Image (cartoon, rainbow, N blue to C red):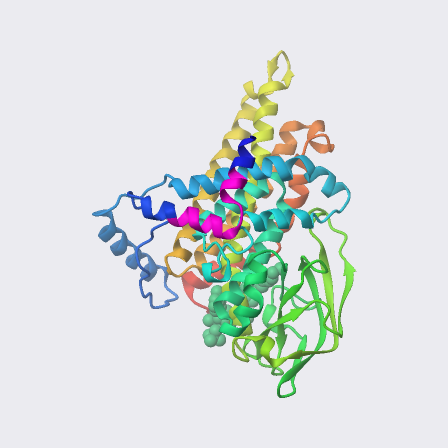
């Protein structure tokens, strides 16, 4: 039997993955800081990074006496990484080029990912989720992105939606949607941006008018990943006029609701197998039951969901960068010019050394942000750092990978040009890297405006 079939048989279905993971938890004798974080501390939010670091230092000194910082993956993390790596190599990598060429959204891959328990990664087990640690999640996105960035991004958005309904929803809302999302019967999409509201997300204009036991939606949303293919849309809409973020509420809108239709499908530079569509609402009536959280809480729900999403995108970027680096490194060993492999020349060596250094740094930033989120520590700044650094790195690494391959890199015989086209958007979506720097600066200085 092929090893991946054995892995499928062993791990198939969310319940099996949970059983397997629970068994590992029980038999794990060596506590790993990433997977068994210390109980969450109560951090009082402060604009001063010095305060945050001083807290961290005392925390670190305290725990260092008991456990050294552990950079090794534990058994659970290694198993998940290896399983997703095998899955990607078999089910995604061989087809990614054709999906890109044909703008094909591989819905069937999501069914396979659901069987592996990847569609409810941050969702409690009682709703058929796998409830994986954030670090395990980062490993999953990284491995998938080595095969194809679009699938990894689509899965991240889906999990952000599933996790947000599980976290902010009522018991009835969870009952209604979370299990079906976590088992892959439904696909999720997240919708914040509009034509005139991108980075300034609080200025959004899509309206939700309260009519007692229902809301009427009017307006449109832009650049929605999984748009048109998804069954469930987490929608931010304005319930009070002129109040910035405080007037925004969050809604769950089902595909097929009368008055909800799709506009144009975007024609993009890359990420061709990930559909990006406009959503249109014309007197679309949804039950008040579909509001997630209280009225006026939607902007905060969106931003706090994006904290996790940004870590995922950092992990995706690390995966794409690693894949590009691997191709460039192999090519530098094999391609000969002037009587030597081109990797014998310092011009190429220094490029590869810089690429490897930055990928390693990006990976550590991503894993650390994932650890902080799982440990209940303040995360916004670390998520922004991880997303910003990892995606800037991936852009640089993929561009340089094309350069190392020269003419061969610019044509479609090698995947590096696809990596480069795909990863550009990671510097833009889930908050541009200029916005990430604003988030970081505000954490350092406070909001001085
Ligand atoms: N989690 C929870 N709440 C948060 C938060 C977070 N990560 N970040 C900010 N908030 C809260 C703030 O505390 C504030 O609450 P109070 O009004 O009670 O103080 C509220 O949200 C508004 O925050 P802020 O004043 O910082 O909002 P701004 O309008 O200045 O916007 C930025 C802040 C620019 C950071 C935000 O609009 C942003 O991230 N924009 C990019 C949007 C984006 O990522 N779009 C991509 C969507 S996916 S393609």
Q: Is residue 209 one of those drawn in magenta?
A: no
Q: Please, what is the dominant secondary structure of the magenta stretch?
A: helix
Q: Residue 128, percent across and down?
A: 51, 58
Residue 352 in the image: above or below residue 105 = above
> In which quarter of the view is residue 280 placed?
bottom right
* Position of residue 440 in the picture relative to residue 229 (left or right): left
Residue 437 in the image: above or below residue 335 = below
> In which quarter of the view is residue 326 placed?
top right
Q: Residue at x 68, y 43 (%)?
A: 421
* Position of residue 239 in the picture relative to residue 23 (left or right): right
Q: Residue at x 45, y 55 (%)?
A: 131
- Residue sitting farthest toward the top: 339
Nearest the viewer among 322 and 199 is 322
* Position of residue 110 in the picture relative to residue 57 (left or right): right
Q: Residue 199, percent across and down?
A: 61, 64
Asked whether residue 322 appears in the rendered view, the answer is no
Q: Residue at x 53, y 32 (%)?
A: 3
Residue 274 in the image: above or below residue 8 = below
Q: Residue at x 45, y 51 (%)?
A: 18
Nearest the viewer among 206 and 288 is 288
| Quarter placement of the N terminus | top right
Q: Residue 135, percent across and down?
A: 44, 49
The segment highlighted magenta reads 7-22
> In which quarter of the view is residue 320 placed?
top right
């Amino acid at each position: 039997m092929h090893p991946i079939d054995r892995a499928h048989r062993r791990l198939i279905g969310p319940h099996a993955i949970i059983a397997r993971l629970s068994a590992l938890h029980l038999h794990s004798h060596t506590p790993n800081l990433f997977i068994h974080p210390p109980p969450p501390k109560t951090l009082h939010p402060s604009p001063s990074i010095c305060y945050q670091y001083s807290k961290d230092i005392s925390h670190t000194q305290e725990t260092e006496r008991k456990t050294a910082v552990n950079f090794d993956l534990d058994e659970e993390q290694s198993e998940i990484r290896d399983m997703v790596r095998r899955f990607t190599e078999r089910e995604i990598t061989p087809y990614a080029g054709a999906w890109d060429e044909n703008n094909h959204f591989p819905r069937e891959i999501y069914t396979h990912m659901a069987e592996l328990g990847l569609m409810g990664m941050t969702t409690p087990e009682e709703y058929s989720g796998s409830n994986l640690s954030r670090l395990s999640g980062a490993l999953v996105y990284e491995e998938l992105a080595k095969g194809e960035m679009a699938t990894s991004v689509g899965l991240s958005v889906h999990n952000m939606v599933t996790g947000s309904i599980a976290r902010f929803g009522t018991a009835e809302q969870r009952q209604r949607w979370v299990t079906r999302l976590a088992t892959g019967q439904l696909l999720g999409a997240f919708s914040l941006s509009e034509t005139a509201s991108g980075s300034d997300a609080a200025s959004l204009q899509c309206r939700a008018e309260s009519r007692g036991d229902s809301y009427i939606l009017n307006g449109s949303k832009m650049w929605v990943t999984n748009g048109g293919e998804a069954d469930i849309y987490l929608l931010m809409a304005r319930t009070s006029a002129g109040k910035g973020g405080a007037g925004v509420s969050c809604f769950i809108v089902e595909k097929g609701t009368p008055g909800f239709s799709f506009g144009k499908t975007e024609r993009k530079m890359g990420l061709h197998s990930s559909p990006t569509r406009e959503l249109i609402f014309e007197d679309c009536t949804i039950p008040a039951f579909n509001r997630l959280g209280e009225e006026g809480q939607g902007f905060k729900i969106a931003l706090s969901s994006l904290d996790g999403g940004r870590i995922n995108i950092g992990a995706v970027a690390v995966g794409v960068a690693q894949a590009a680096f691997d191709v460039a490194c192999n090519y530098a060993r094999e391609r000969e010019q002037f009587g030597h492999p081109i990797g014998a020349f310092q011009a190429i060596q220094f490029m590869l050394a810089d690429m490897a250094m930055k990928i390693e740094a990006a990976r550590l930033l991503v894993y650390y942000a994932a650890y902080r989120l799982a440990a209940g520590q303040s995360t916004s700044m670390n998520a922004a750092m991880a997303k910003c650094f990892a995606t800037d790195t991936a852009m640089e690494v993929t561009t340089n990978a094309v350069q190392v391959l020269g003419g061969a890199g610019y044509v479609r015989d090698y995947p590096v040009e696809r990596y480069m086209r795909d990863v550009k958007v990671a510097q833009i979506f889930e908050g541009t890297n200029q916005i990430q720097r604003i988030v970081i600066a505000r954490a350092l200085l406070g909001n001085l405006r």
